[in-house]
Image (cartoon, coloured by chain):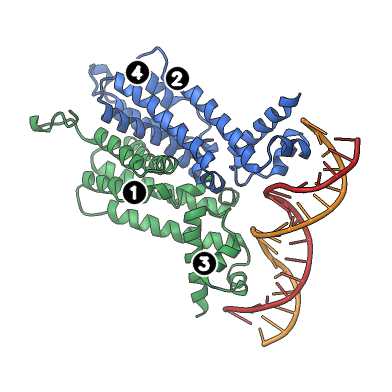
Chain colours: A blue, B green, C orange, D red
Amino acid sequence: MTAEARRILIEAAQELYAANGVAATTPREVLARSGVGQGSLYHHFPSKRDLAAAAVAQTVDDTLGSAAATLDGADEPERRIADYLERPRAATAGCRVGRLTADPVVMGDETLRGEVSRYFAELIELVARAFTEQGLDAAAARDRATTAVAVIQGGYVLSRALGDDAAMRAAVRGLLELLEPAPTGPDERSRHE
Amino acid sequence: MTAEARRILIEAAQELYAANGVAATTPREVLARSGVGQGSLYHHFPSKRDLAAAAVAQTVDDTLGSAAATLDGADEPERRIADYLERPRAATAGCRVGRLTADPVVMGDETLRGEVSRYFAELIELVARAFTEQGLDAAAARDRATTAVAVIQGGYVLSRALGDDAAMRAAVRGLLELLEPAPTGPDERSRHE
DNA sequence: GTCTATATGCAGATAGAC
DNA sequence: GTCTATCTGCATATAGAC
């Protein structure tokens, strides 16, 4: 059971951070949600930052792993990119990682900031690889991957701001429309009329 | 001088919110930065939310006005859109409005959330108008405008996460590359080799 | 490892004089 | 309108027993 409380605390913190961020999540809330006692919390995590470091690293690993499962798949690169962009998302909840860029506790701590940076560096790299497989040169693939990841992050911001998942879907549709090669078959035309 | 303290307080709050968000900005900090006394603060703004409502509304008005100046200009729509996308931005600082979508105080207050929502609704509308002028139908223009605004918001998130303004520039380059019509002249080809 | 008790300091005001 | 004094409650731990 010794590692159990630790794991439970991390999970509770991850959920609270996803909802309210790190700065706004208090030790009391973590205790209440986890059901663990105060002594255990401060035994496993001497300070709030220690808990945050563990929970954020876990969230980054989880999220990157799930993105890699789609982007490193066996399908055609076009398909993998589209699958990644169109993946169902709780957009109005915001991105668990992206929202941390606005969190003063995260940005004020080198370790936490490093986790957020690692997430996006690796995610852009994953997407860029797929664009490279499509035949783009390295520089163009990197730019386009940055654009694609930005559309998702911006989609989260817009969905949250407007209180509607439709914003994320519109942003993704707009990008996919631009990514599609000019229609080759006559029956592919005029999707918009 | 009666309205003077009020204005000074709003300006100080705007700057602090841009740096740290609303939730993390304390009355003490606003007092210190503004040089105004505590009595004045609570005279003009009975609660923290009242100050936030005034300061956020001001920021939204300022920022929308500056975007409209570019997007409603007299140039060709292509040019106005490119100018808006390429406008110099302190990207690692984050978007003053977009970052508020991760702020628990803002999202927990209907008035404040309404200001953020108004900002993005109007901004998307401004951009969509330019795309419509380019000849896109209303639905396609709206999607593409949402994509464009998402690229900027995502560019802020990525620049902040990676600690580098280059991420914003890459995201914008990637989008502009997609927006450019297929090269018509032979000397326009192979920009990337 | 986990518990309960206790401590410090600041957030976010309120009160009443000037 | 602005000032200073004061107040309540919670964030964030620390201490020491079990």
Q: CA distance from mark 4 to mark 1?
A: 34 Å
| Label 1: which secondary element | helix
Query: Residues at badges 4 and 2 in contact (C-beta under 8 Å)?
Result: no
Question: Dot 4: few (<14), some (14–19), or many (≥20) neighbours within 10 Å?
Answer: many
Q: To which residue does mark 4 refer?
A: A77
Report the amino acid beneath label 4.
Answer: Pro
Pointer 1: what residue? B126
Q: Is residue B17 above or below residue A156?
A: below
Disc 1 crowd rating (10 Å Cα; few below 14, some 14-19, many 20+) is many
Q: Chain of mark 1?
A: B
Q: Nearer the viewer, mark 1 or mark 3?
A: 3
- Judged from this view, the residue extending furthest toward the left is B186
Q: Which mark is residue A7?
A: none
Please report the residue visible at 15 percent of the width from the left and 28 percent of the height from the top: B190
Q: Is residue A135 above or below residue B50?
A: above
Identify which amino acid the numbered label 2 is placed on.
Thr
The residue under label 3 is: B33
Q: CA distance from mark 1 to mark 3?
A: 35 Å
Name which of mark 4 and mark 2 comes first in the sequence. 2
Q: Is residue B147 above or below residue B18?
A: above
Looking at the image, residue B63 lies above or below residue A151? below
**Left or right, B46 with reference to B4:** right
Alpha carbons under labels 4 and 2: distance apart: 10 Å
Residue at which label 2 appears: A70
Q: Chain of mark 4?
A: A
Counting from the top left corner in percent of width and height, residue B33 is at 52, 67
Q: Are marks 4 and 1 on the same chain?
A: no
Q: Which of the two discs, 1 and 3, labels the residue nearer the N terminus?
A: 3
Split into 4 quadrants, where in the image is the C terminus of chain B?
top left
Q: CA distance from mark 3 to mark 4?
A: 52 Å
Percent across and percent down for residue C13 are: 68, 65
In percent of width and height, residue B71 lies at 29, 51
